[in-house]
Structures are given as structure tokens and as C-alpha cells.
Amino acid sequence: MTYTFDFSALLPYWPDFLWGAVLTLQLSAVATVAGFIVGTLCAIGRADGSPVVKAIVAAYVEVIRNTPLLVQVFIIYFGIATLGIRVSANLAAMIALTVNVGAYTCEIVRAGLQSIHRSQVEAAECLGLSKPQIYWHVIVRPAIERVYPSLTSQYVLLMLASSITSQISAEELTAVANRIQSGTFRAFETYIVVGLIYLVLSFVMRGAFTAFAQAAFTRRRKLGTTL
Amino acid sequence: MSPVVKLSNVHKYFGALKVLEGVSFEVERGGVAAVIGQSGSGKSTALRCINALETIQDGTIEVCGHAVGDPKLDRRALRQDVGIVFQSYNLFPHLTVEQNIMLAPTCVKSIGKSEARDLARDVLAQVGLSEKAQQYPEQLSGGQQQRVAIARSLAMQPKLMLFDEVTSALDPQLTGEVLKVMEDLARGGMTMILVTHEMAFARKVASQVIYMHKGQVWETGPGSMLDAPKTPELANFVGSGL
């Protein structure tokens, strides 16, 4: 079998690759931040909410974790359209990814919350801290620190999974690749290039997460504990 | 002068298990009460009830003017008057010594950062750990951690300090340094209740010793009562303990 690689056919498309990569990063950044907030609030609700809140969060988490992301993306994209609200494919992709990663974040953060010993909370209560203050200073921050490696993996996974939103023609990297290969008939080369770009994006993301950890988790930085 | 702490006929159950059965005692302003007794005699539970960490089923507890048994109790107000130190220190591991101390004054009393830092410096000097302000708890010995925990409570300027077996996890030398801090506090006029197994310390520092047995105050009196127990249970307890 002989195959002659020809990457030159792709050269004119470099701005498309670049914008695809930028949009993939944008999607991932928004879904990471929003998903983190959603997931953390859900974790607190599941740990400490009323029975109704607990049931709602449990249902959300189980539905999301037990259905395919592609199906979720379709349901959200077409569902919103059916409600008569016009949203772009990119926005629908952002919402779908947020909803998806929020559920996984919830479970990861919940594990972190449960790892905080009851005596820490008791000490904070005895110092007169209010419940929100206790959550912020004594529970959530150390909990996030503990589960940070899992969160990092989850959000990198999210970035890779965002390729699925090409199916609703969100203009991210994989969608760009699909378009380019159908124009150049150089599918193999196109997806090799795209694969390499995803690899670079993963490293960029991991680097960003490490930098954030260095800034946020002062104790680990000062004591030289690895993350 | 009304007592700072007054327990009257306090009953506490954990399910079917009776832990406190009609406990009554009071502590005057500036008094140091040492609560002693075997494990399971209810002494730690009694202490935790004073701080509303446990709810009681019957009787009344009055602490610094707060009716602790009242369902409408403002727990946060109570806890601004009462400091507590635990056997397991319970310092916040992700915060420096100074941040551990500054957290409650800045959050609860809303005082400024620089003022809180001054406060931290003062209380750390009081427990002899001024040079440890920027360290993290895991970098300190057990005795030092416990002294930081005491300093953290003192920073809230409580009217009453509770100590729940604070030296039980420490070797004799570290125990000594923590007890010295507590003795200084007592001399400074702090009202204190301590659950302890340090009989020598109770005899020396306490203005009042409370011996608990089977969820009741079995015998109470000045420190010298440990030398001449009236009840056979206390005689047995101190006899086996020393």
C-alpha cells in the first residue's frame, strides 16, 4: 500500500485551523468556568440541601452521566429551537457542554466536600463563622484543592469532547476539519493536523491549570507539595 | 455576682443511651473548673453542651447570659462569647498560623486586615509562638499546633474558654508547654472549664474540681479534694490514675 502524504494542500487553510482552535478553547473555557460553578453549587446542594434539592440534583447528575453527550447536545440544540428561542450553534454548544460537565464536576467536588472532616466545620462554627463563610473558607477551598487533579482531567476531557458539537455545526476545530477535508479530499492529513492541534490545546490547558493551582494553592506552593 | 456558666439538672441522651443525668454546676467569673472522670462519664459531652455543639433534652444551661437550651438561641452570638479548644486541634490546614487566627475576627467581627494581623501578633506572643506566624499547621509540633488553636480562640476575645482534653494527644514535654499557656490564662483571670486527665494540673490550677461518674456530678470541691476523696469512686479513680 502506498500513500503519498500531501500536507501542502492544507496550507491555505491555516487561518481556519487557527480560528477553530480558538473557538474550541473558548467553548472549553466557558464550559469549564460555568460548569465549575454549576457543579460546585450542585455538590453543596446534594450534600447539604433540602430533600427536594437533593433529589433534583441527583436526577440531573444521573441523567447526564448516563446518556451520551451527543444526544444531550442534540436535545439542547433542538429543544431550545423548539421553544422558539433562536440561539447560535456555538451558544447551544456552550450550554450543552456546561450542563454536561456540571454533572461530572458535581460528583468530583462532592467527593472533595465529603473528605473535609466534620471537626473542621465544628471548629469554624465554634469561632462564630456563618454557614456561607464556613463553606467558602473551610470546606470548598480545601475540598477543591484535594480534587483538583480530577477536575483538571475532567476539563481536559471536556475540551476533547467539545469536538462532538461539530455535529450541530458549531464552528470549532473538528467542524473546521470536516469542512476542510471535504474541500481538499485530504482527510488523513487534515485529521492528523487536527489531532496535533488538540494535543497542543491539551498541553496548553494543563499548563493553565497548573499555573492557576500555583497561584491559588499557596500552601502547596510554599511547602513544595505536588498537585 | 452571677455565674458565667450555670448548668441546672441537665439531661442528655444519644438515642436510648443516657449520657448526662441531671448535671448541675456553676462557674464564677475568673473561675477555673476542671472536669475529671473516666472515659464515657459524660464530661466531654457536658462541655460540648455548654457550647451548643450538642442539644440537651432537659434542664437549663446559661452561659454568659445566653439560654443555651432555648430553641431561639443565637448560636453565633453565644460562640462569640465562648472559645473552645479540641483534643485534635482542628486548625485549618490550608491556612497559615496567622491566617488561622485572623479568619474569625475578619469574618465574624468584620475588623480590618491590619488590625486582625496585630491581634494575631498579640495572641501568638501570648502563647509564645510569635515566630511561627507564617508557618502552616503541618510544619508545627502537636504542642505548637495546640497553642495556635488556643491563640485562635483567644483572638475572638471570649469571656469563657472551654478545653476538651487538649493535652491528651501530646507527650509529657509538649503537654507541659500547653499547660503553661493555660495556667497563664487562668492567672490572667480567664474563666475556664477544662476536661482533663492531668490531675496534677487540676489540683494546682483549678478553683473547682468536678468529678463526673455515670453521667452525674459525683463529687465536687476545691483542688484539694483530690487528696481526700469522699466517695469511693473518686478514691478509686485518683488512686488508679496517680
Image: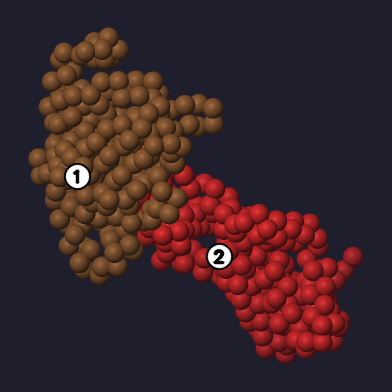
Is the Cβ of the residue at disc 1 closer than 8 Å to that at disc 2?
no
Q: Nearer the viewer, residue B70 or A49?
A: B70
Which tag is nearer the camera, tag 1 or tag 2? 1
Determine the secondary structure under disc 2: helix
Count neighbours of disc 2 (C-alpha within 10 A) and say few if under 14, some if 14 to 19, many if 20 or more.
some
In three-dimensional space, the C-alpha distance between marks 1 and 2, rounded to whole angstroms, equals 63 Å
- Residue at 29% across, 46% down: B63
Judging from the image, mark 2 belongs to the subunit labelled: A
For disc 1, the marked residue is B2
Q: From the top left corner, tell me how far across and down residue B28 is, in percent.
A: 18, 40
Image hue for chain A: red
Q: From the top left corner, tell me how far across and down residue B221 is, in percent.
A: 18, 24
- Residue at 23% across, 63% down: B116
Image hue for chain B: brown
For disc 2, the marked residue is A206
Determine the secondary structure under disc 1: loop
Is there any visible trace of residue B171 in the rendered image? Answer: no
A128 is higher (above) or lower (below) than B142: below
Mark 2 belongs to which amino acid?
A: Arg
